[in-house]
Image: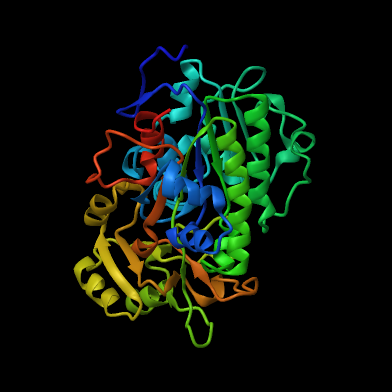
Amino acid sequence: MSSETKTISVNGRDYRWPDKPCVVVCIDGSEPDYIEEAIKAGVMPWMQKVVEQQGVDLRAHCVVPSFTNPNNISIVTGVPPVVHGICGNFYYDRDGDREVMMNEPSLLRTPTIFKAFQDAGAKIAIITAKDKLRRLLGNELRFGADGAICFSSEKSDQATLAENGIENVLELVGMEVPSVYSAELSEFIFAAGVKLMERERPDLMYLSTTDYIQHKFAPGSEGANAFYAMMDRYWAQLDALGAVIALTADHGMNAKHDAATGEPNIVYLQDEFDRLLGPGRARVILPITDPYVVHHGALGSYATVYLPDGADIDGLTKQMLEIDGIDLVYGNREGCERFELAPDRMGDLILLSRRDTVIGTTAARHDLSGLDVPLRSHGGLTEQAVPLIISRPVSGLDRGRQLHNYDAFDVALNYARH
């Protein structure tokens, strides 16, 4: 399809065909302060030029729960979880009586923007840090010769033409497979992205990092600034190659520990419900849960609870709000309406904790031995603010509109000056 085609429609939204490559970057865990502090420190010259002269610095909201899977999938579908169905990293399948990682493409209820564009002839390239997202992001795409490219840094050495649309990735990038708990896992994404932009020049490219650094380092710290300086150098290269770049995040990040002692502030919610209702009668689900728990101990600021039949929901809501550290409690209907979630994939109660507090199940279920710095995490409303930075000026955008991270492709394709 040529650039004369005006729009591609998917999930009720229209997107203009790009006349330059469009790159959307999801910086995992990027509280807006990270970029602001790195600019102040003078380590992000390209970004400083973008926000002060070349482009625009918008602010947006992420999806709540502010976790990786629901937000990445919202970004690449252009719609909230109530439409696409991915409401966390983890959920409880009531019908099957099993707790399930939300990594399976069968759980998706909508096509992606990539699928719609590929069907119209676009070249697609997707690189993610952790392999858990890869199959969701690449759902329904065609691979093989002249197909889409979709692989993870984590398993870049295993990429094949049939499964990923590319082979010999390590040779292309000139790096070894990084540790999953490293800054290099994200750097690999950008190094590969630049190489693919030079070689393939895809119409749409999506680059999604890991938040390992943000879990360990606060904005303005040496570790954070070094990480953002690294990304800035690669973004400058993509810009020089002619790409229109949109930068956003899946969620922010906050300190979740006592400022004096460094000990994490945790409400063990399963213990509370066991005390109130009896052991095991309620089931607490933490949607932050994924296979990579070293840096957060499966502790976030959001939980959903499945209650036994006949439970006093109003009474339990009042009792939960009396717990120090619990900020908000909703019933299923109210909570799903507030946060645009799929009701059938949420429990009877939805709870969010205070800014400095996380929610656990029981102390015995959380291994915190991997925390070598005071806990930083996410999941609640206090991590909802995220950047939305476009490398070109935008025109025609209603500045009074509440933007979300899942508007990234909309703004980059429909409003940025190409």
Q: Nearer the viewer, residue 5 or 345?
A: 5
Residue 101 in view here: no
Q: Residue furthest front?
A: 53
For the point 52% across and 24% down, the residue is 203
For the point 37% across and 62% down, the residue is 380
* Residue 120 in the figure: left or right of residue 124: left
Q: Residue furthest left?
A: 314
- Horizontal and vertical percent position of residue 130: 61, 47
Can you say whether 254 is above or below 60 in the image?
Answer: below
Residue 240 in which image quadrant: top right
Can you say whether 347 is above or below 159 in the image?
Answer: below
Residue 140 in view here: yes
For the point 47% across and 12% down, the residue is 2
* Residue 292 in the figure: left or right of residue 406: right
Can you say whether 63 is above or below 73 in the image?
Answer: below
- Horizontal and vertical percent position of residue 36: 46, 60
- Horizontal and vertical percent position of residue 375: 53, 73
Tag count = 0
Q: Nearer the viewer, residue 326 or 271?
A: 326
Q: Residue furthest bottom?
A: 260
Q: How is this picture coloured?
A: rainbow
For the point 45% across and 51% down, the residue is 250
Can you say whether 169 is above or below 38 in the image?
Answer: above
Placement of the C terminus among the 4 image quadrants: top left
- Horizontal and vertical percent position of residue 22: 49, 31
